[in-house]
Amino acid sequence: MVGETCIGLITKATLYCELPELGKISRNKLAKLVGVAPLTKISGKFDGKRPVRGGRSKVRRVLYMASLVGTQKNPVIRQFYLKLLQKGKPKELALIACMRKLLLMIHDMVRSQQKWEPQKKVNDQAVANLATGSTCSAGH
């Protein structure tokens, strides 16, 4: 991994060992593979909740802990988490969304061979990226 986004040694090692596809497949496929992609459950007029399930449990467990730390220490993840809570989302849903966000940030950094630069990520561009779903801008 080129850079880190508030992840520790255990998280890095787990991602290296359990997720060799990191940086090689599409973002949606990666989120499904890990089990942090919401799966639509619609039947007729019934529009149910979109649960996350399946995937690689070891990776999900370390992402959960990294996301918990990220909501406190990582400014991008923290802003994203607080924004979801302000919209009235449950804390569990917001944390799972942060897990996905963190995974995709790491995926994009591995794919583009970029390092994490927190002072550049906190600027207005990072806030705009949160709204669009983009995690790494080409200018950094």
Image (cartoon, rainbow, N blue to C red):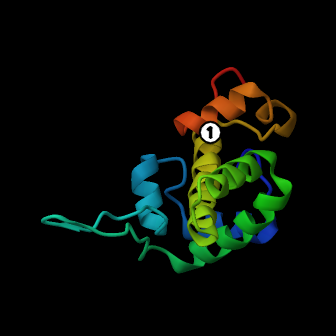
In this rendering, the answer to whether 85 lies above or below 128 is below
Q: SS at mark 1? A: helix
Percent across and percent down for residue 19 are 54, 64
Q: Is residue 7 visible?
A: no
Q: Residue at x 49, y 75 (%)?
A: 56
Q: Residue at x 57, y 61 (%)?
A: 89
Of residues 113 and 41, the one nearer the viewer is 41
Seen as rendered, the residue at the extreme left is 44
Mark 1 is on which residue type?
Answer: Leu
Instruction: Answer few, some or many: residues within 10 Å of disc 1's Cα (few below 14, many 20 plus, some between 14 and 19).
Output: some
* Circle 1 residue: 130
Please provide percent x and percent y for residue 107: 58, 48
On-image quarter of the C terminus: top right
Q: Residue at x 76, y 39 (%)?
A: 115
82 vs 90, left or right, is: right
Q: Quadrant of residue 46?
A: bottom left
Q: Residue furthest top?
A: 139
Residue 129 picture location, percent across and down: 62, 33
Q: Is residue 37 visible?
A: yes
